[in-house]
Image (tube, rainbow, N blue to C red):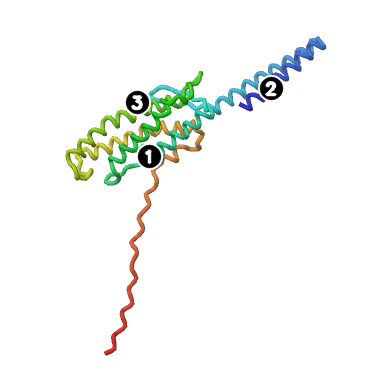
Amino acid sequence: MVMRALLAGIVGGVIGIAAYSISQTGGQPLSVAVGCLIGVAVVLGGELYRRSAQLTEVRLVVLGSEMSFKTKTDMRHAAQRMFFQAATRVATRPLEDGHGNLREALTSLKTLFDLYREPLESEGTPLPPANGNSVYELALHILNFELAPFLTKWHPRLKAFEESDRGQDESEWSENSVFREELRALQERLRPYLIGLGEIAGIPDPASHLRRSARVSPPASATVPDQPSSPATPE
């Protein structure tokens, strides 16, 4: 915004000087020279404006359609909040076979669903921009096409297992492996959305925050040193 205002001031000043000079002299050579200067100023100003616009615009392809986002301050804040809300949950963190709790995973996804939906229903949500897309449209895609279908399918199935086989471990659920497989597929589909949110927020290399952390090998069991033998009891 500051750059654009400065640019407008410079171009306006050049045009003002040119108009004044022409009105004072009326000479043809000066008029031609000033006209050239105005043309150069307009062309350079347009180029600088175009580059400035490119630096504050992010384009994403979502469900086969291109979306364009003007990264204003309020939109960047919203995108940053949504990025970190997902980056710290099972929506992006791996749930290895034989590890983790399926009920907790579903609860985490439901919490993310509620966090994303809340600003969409809030009266304080900014109106959509006149040009381009809103970051909340991206949230709507995530809710309607990714999180909602997964939760609608798996919440009642896991609940039915929990109620019919009380006390049974989740590992014995017949759909355990299918749930985990579909969760991994969901995470892969969410990844481009979240990287896009990171780019809108201006986070450097947002994909690096979504990479699987290297598993830390458990420390080797400490070896208990041999205890010194008790001194012989004198007879």
Q: Which residue is mark 2?
A: 9
Q: Amino acid at mark 3?
A: Asn
Q: Residue placed at 55% from the left, 26% from the top?
A: 54
Q: Residue furthest left?
A: 164
In primary-sequence order, the first of circles 2 and 3 is 2
Q: Amino acid at mark 2?
A: Gly
**Location of residue 8 by image quarter:** top right
Report whether 159 appears left or right of 76: left
Q: Residue placed at 33% from the left, 66% from the top?
A: 223
Q: Secondary structure at mark 2?
A: helix
Q: Residues within 10 Å of mark 3 (few under 14, many from 20)?
A: few
- Residue 20, percent across and down? 78, 14
Q: Secondary structure at mark 1?
A: loop
Separation of marks 2 and 1 at Cα, in angstroms: 48 Å
Separation of marks 1 and 3 at Cα, in angstroms: 19 Å
Q: Which mark is residue 144?
A: 3
Q: Secondary structure at mark 3?
A: helix
Q: Residues within 10 Å of mark 1 (few under 14, many from 20)?
A: some
Looking at the rendered image, the quarter that the N terminus falls into is top right
Is 196 placed above or below 93 here? above
Q: Which residue is mark 1?
A: 89
Q: Residue placed at 39% from the left, 23% from the top?
A: 64
Separation of marks 2 and 3 at Cα, in angstroms: 46 Å
Looking at the rendered image, the quarter that the C terminus falls into is bottom left
Q: Residue placed at 37% from the left, 38% from the top?
A: 92
